[in-house]
Each structure stands twice: as C-alpha cells, then as structure tokens.
Image (cartoon, rainbow, N blue to C red):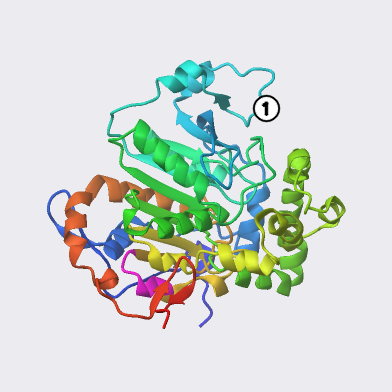
Amino acid sequence: MFDLSWVLGHAKTAYTHHTDPIPLETKSGRKTHLALVAHDSIPPCRLNPFLFNGHLQTMYTARPDPGPPIHYKRKILDSTHSVYPGQFAVDFVVSKEIGESATKSTSDNLPERTTNFTPQEWSSIASSDTAPMLIALHGLTGGSHEVYLRETLAPLTAAGWAACVVNGRGCALSKITTPQLFNSRATWDVRQTIITLTELFPNRPLYAVGFSLGANILTNYVGEEGSQCVLRAAVSCSNPWNLEVCNVELQRTWIGLEIYARTMGANLKKLFELHKEQILQNGEIDREKVESSRYLHEFDRYVQCPTWGYPTEGAYYRDSQSVDALLAVRIPFLGINAEDDPISSKAGIPYEEFKQNPYAVLCTTNWGGHLGSFQLGGGRWFATAASAFLSKMHNEIDHEASRTERKETKIDAPGKKYPIYDPNHRRLILPEA
C-alpha cells in the first residue's frame, strides 16, 4: 500500500541504541535509562508536507528567515594551544535589555545583535550561580547568528539557561591572526572554552549541542575527553559522521556535486577572501588553485590539506571524521539525523557504533534534509527535539546519583587484554612483541 503519511506531515522516527543503555536516576529517585529519556522527551516529527523530501527541506534553509532574536556579547579568546596559537570568538547570550542597550562601535564588524564585551563587563562576568549552561557549535562557515542554532537556544535561554557559541576561527565575522581556519577535528578551541567556563562558573552544569560540522567537532571532543568529560550531556544534530563516505556520496550525483558541494565550496571561498592575507602567509597554499576551486573537496585539497599537513583531502576526512570517536563517548549523548539528508548521508550514519555504546542514542527520521526538518507552523523539529532532550536531562535527572549507578557499566572493564581498539586514533593497540 502506498504510504501517504507525508501528506499529513508525519515523518517516521526510529531509535538506535545499545540493548542495555546506561542507567539514570531521576531527582525523585525513580530508575530510568538514557534511551527512555530520549523517547519520552523527543516529540513526534511533524513536518511541512509542501517540503516533502530532503532536497526541498535542505534548500528551504536558504530562504530569508529572521529567527528568534538572540542577543550576544562577544569575547575574543587567545588560544593556549602550543601548536595552534591565534584567537577565536565566543559569543555569550545576553538579555534583550542588555543587548539593545549596548552600543556598537562604528569600527566593529560584527553580526546582527552582537556587541563586544567591554573590559569592565568581562572582568565581572564570573558567577557562582547554578544556572545550566549550553555550549553550541555551528555548522560549516556558520556562526552564532544561524537561525537553526538560535531556534535551539531560544526555548532554553527563555527558561533560564545561560548559553554561549564557540565560533569557528574566521567565522561569524571574526578575525584570524594565524594562517589557520577551523577544521573538522578542531577540538582545541571548544576544549579551552569549556575549561574557561568551569573557571568562571564553577557551579554551572554544562551541556553542549553541535550542528553539522560542529556536531562532528563536538563528538570528537566528547570522545577525546572520554570519562573525564565535564559535560552532563551532549546532542549532535545533522552530523556528517563519516566524512569520507559523505564526500563520495556528494560527488556521486549531479545535484550533490553541482548544488551542495559547489555551494559549500563557494561559502568557503568567501571566507578565504575575507582572510586571505593571513591564510596566504602559509607558503604551501597556492592562491591560484584556491581561487580556481569550485567544490568543497577542492577547497579542502588546496587549503585545509596544506594548512594542517594532510597529504590528501581523503586523509583529512578519515582523520577528522567522528564515526569512531562515538565509541569513546562516556556521557549521555543523543544523535539526531534525517535519513534523507543529502549532505550528511545516511550511508555515513554509524548505526552499529550506536548499538555498541550504552552512553549513546540515535534518533533518525526518514524525512527532514540537512538542518531542515521544517514544521508546517514554522520552526525546525530537530531544534525542538534537541532542546526538549536537554531540558529533561537537566530538570529531571540526578546526575550524581546516575554516575554512581553507572559504576557497574562493563564497557570500560579494567584489565582488558590485547588487542585494544583506540577509537580516537582508529587503530588496534597491540603489545610490541
């Protein structure tokens, strides 16, 4: 029988997870588990039936949309990384009153509703309050101004959450002071941000959400931190997961190559034009090749590879993709993907890895595109799902009691014998002899 559920906007939702998800305890003392929290918090997926496939949902993201009016104060942080110095911009959500009363200097080149912290404002930002705080990471060439990001932040900040956005180097009209832009494995800036937040706000429980490329970076970060990760929970939205597979899938079809890969390549070239004085200080980068590039993978070949030392874009994608890092995640983690996403291909979604990690749950819809999932009444479903999950994790879960409950989890059993798989470096560890 022909399925006409899309006429009513009814997308199909499916969950993939370990047979024994990590146990959680609510603040009332009730026992539950991660998969059940996801099931109970995420609403049914009801989308705009006029945008009836992934291409329409994805292309609709390009239309003008004012989105929720989130106001920010920007802080430029100097990187403490010994190999990757420079600076990056973190935008902190402030109230409408503070945002509208702030004065923007004529010399400031900042996104809408964004002003810089004054030295006095930043020196007094530290607080001992216990408000939950969300760290957000945007998608490729995006920033704190993106509508999909603001739609996720809006209901949480309205409920009293604090929030900030870690902008990729060179994004959101930020300046770079070294020849490096962001890359897909650039976890060092979000790590430094989180360390800074724990110093400034020692009592705030921290959560995180990432979108597209930002979801890939966030997953890598959480995997690298492992059991030492200070985040209470994290959400990954439209993560491309397996970048090499997604690259192959993009180039396999005309629309993938000529629409999506070309558009993303053009956006990256705009960033290059903004920052070429700095980027071209790297003598390995050939300006003519960069300017003649048309597609995402060509930009990565001519800019990202010589910037970071990769021999090919394939090596870059294999090293920076987060599909294996998922296995090292040791905090409650939710992935949200649409199976008709033309950019973050279904072929790259790590279903089996989700089944192997009791700390992770995957929610997939059969319809929604890339950072789309537009609902008939407005807004994006995945933004509602992400904020609802985070709200439930904070409002109802006793995280300290849940950590005690998880001591019996066997995924990291001590004394494991060789061979040992290292998910962050994608290799088996064997004894020397």
The residue shown at (33%, 48%) is 230
x then y, percent, for residue 152: 46, 45
* Location of mark 1 (residue): 109
Q: Which residues are magenta?
A: 353-359
SS for dot 1: loop
Q: Nearer the viewer, residue 322 or 115?
A: 322
- Mark 1: which amino acid? Asn
Q: Is residue 362 left or right of residue 62?
A: left
**Residue displayed at 66% across by 46% down:** 180
User: Where, by quadrant of the figure, is residue 67 drawn?
Assistant: top right
Depth order, front residue of 394/296? 296
> What is the tally of numbered marks visible in this picture?
1
Residue at figure coordinates x 30%, y 79% from the top left: 417
Across and down, in percent, residue 242 comes to: 56, 69
Residue 184, visible in the rendered structure: yes
Q: Name the quarter where the C terminus is drawn.
A: bottom left
Residue reaching furthest to the left: 29
Classify residue 313 by image quadrant: bottom right
**Residue 25 in view (yes/no):** no
Q: Does the magenta-highlighted stretch encompass residue 216?
A: no
Residue 410 figure quarter: bottom left
